[in-house]
Amino acid sequence: MRIISEKVSDECLERPLQWEVELAAPVTRDVIEQMRRFGDVEYHRGFLKPLYRLEVTGRFWIKGVQGSSKMRLILCRNDFEGAMAEFREMVGRLESERDARAAVEPQEVGA
């Protein structure tokens, strides 16, 4: 997946530890399941719009709503720049259904 915007949360006073992140595609149930490779995922399907939370111990947390392309990123105080780099790498390794379809659909070849 691809990040299209990162914005420091208005709630941050000292260091930029909380971020509002927007992805190029909505977070689906499949993407949430892929997050399990990186840390502990809580998935709350009992809500009208299911909520998820990923914790990568000692690095960062992600909170969001299934179906939305926006999420909140909370970085740990230790090495927050390194944690942000790890978050960006993780997002790059997540594959949306749209990405997966594009990878297997045949490309038209010009005549």
Image (spheres, helix red, strand yellow):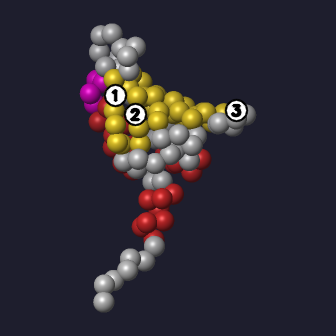
Magenta span main SS: helix
Query: Which disc is residue 47 wearing?
Result: 3
- Secondary structure, mark 1, is strand
Mark 2, residue position: 21
Badge 3 crowding class, 10 Å Cα cut-off, few under 14, some 14 to 19, many 20 or more, is: few
Single out the residue that lies furthest toward the bottom. Answer: 111
x, y percentage for residue 22? 41, 38
Residue positioned 53% across, 40% down in the render: 68
Residue 75 badge:
none
Lower sequence index among marks 1 and 3 = 1
> Which residue in the protein does label 1 denote?
7
Tag 3 secondary structure: loop
Give how far apart the Cα atoms at labels 3 and 2 are.
Answer: 22 Å
Magenta extent? 78-82
Residue 60 seen in the figure: no
Q: Check residue 36 for magenta coloring.
A: no
